[in-house]
Image (tube, rainbow, N blue to C red):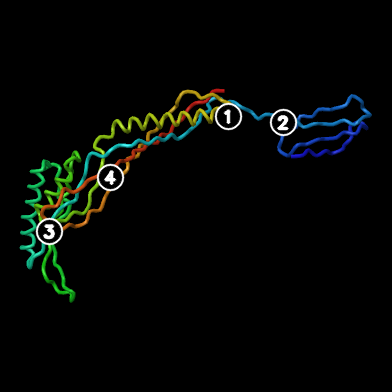
Amino acid sequence: MMSKAWPTRVGGAALVLAGAGLGLGLGLALAGPSAGSAAVLTAARRAGPTGAAPGARVSVVGTAEVTGTPDTMTLQIGASTSAASASAALERNNAEVEALEAALESAGVQKTDMQTASLSLGPTYDSAGNVDGYQASDELTVTLHGLARAGSVIDAAAHAVGNDVQIDGISFSISSTSSLLAAAREGAVRDAEQKASELAAAAGAKLGPVVSITDEESQPPPVFLPFGSAAVVGGTPDVPVQPGSQQLSVQVHAVFSLAG
């Protein structure tokens, strides 16, 4: 910005005031030894206060993300049966779900990893709105540990039920996240310290010791993949299963003291 000069007089001498801009501290200096000659007052920039006041602190947020491979799959699988009467539909459904559970156990799934998720029994209707039969549905939530044989387990379970099989979806998760979260926390704290150091340096202060850290880890929900009902045909290959990867993130709120 170009300086502007304003003429004035001090003791009969012509003075020129040079100002750089509004809002700046002005240091005034009188130029010219002779009272009768033109003198110039110049404006000098003054640095603002730097350093830290007693008890000053800086608060920052640090984040870090790590990636892991899922090793557990949760499967929604069951049977849906129809019959002319409610009792017949339920009886048929019971037999197919028992066969399903037996196939899962034979494939190495523990009973503790099978849980009834839903059970329904009700009428079905024709186009005119009249009851034309009954439908029973029983669904299990099945947890598979270790994904190497997951495809063959799903295939065996589906064949045990036949065309009445119902697979609603699968989800993947990581069974143990301790080591991953530990690495993410370390990275988040380092990130917070780096940010705090930069802020302290910008203020002309030095970063002191940490005052407090609050951990707010964030684990994503399991990845849910819709599967849909399936019609089973003999001789089909194992169901392909790809677990992909999952991200876990950690966020920390850190407070550091500042030194002057």
CA distance separating discs 1 and 4: 44 Å
Label 3 belongs to which residue?
Answer: 163
Per the model, the C-alpha gap separating discs 1 and 3 is 71 Å
Three-letter amino acid code of the residue under disc 4:
Pro
Disc 4 crowd rating (10 Å Cα; few below 14, some 14-19, many 20+) is some
Secondary structure of residue under mark 2:
loop
Please state which amino acid type lies under the numbered disc 3. Answer: Asn
Q: Amino acid at mark 2?
A: Arg
Return the x and y of residue 34 as percentages of the image width and height: 92, 25
Residue bearing mark 4: 222
Q: Earlier in the sequence, mark 3 or mark 4?
A: 3
The N terminus lies in quadrant: top right
Q: Earlier in the sequence, mark 1 or mark 3?
A: 3
- Name which of mark 2 and mark 4 comes first in the sequence: 2
Q: Which residue is mark 2?
A: 45
Q: How far apart in space, not on screen, are marks 3 and 2 (Cα)? A: 85 Å
Type of amino acid at the residue the image marks with label 1: Ala
Label 1 or label 4, whichever comes before in sequence order = 1
Q: Secondary structure at mark 1?
A: loop
Do tag 2 and tag 4 residues touch (Cβ < 8 Å)?
no
In the rendered image, which quarter contains the C terminus?
top right
- For marks 1 and 2, the one nearer the N-term is 2
Q: Position of residue 92 (x, y in %)?
A: 6, 59
Q: CA distance from mark 1 to mark 2?
A: 18 Å
Is the residue marked by circle 2 packed among few (<14), some (14-19), or many (20+) residues within 10 Å? few
Q: Nearer the viewer, mark 1 or mark 3?
A: 3
Q: Is residue 15 above or below residue 123?
A: above
Front: mark 3 or 4 = 3
Name the element at disc 3. helix
- Per the image, the residue denoted by label 1 is 203
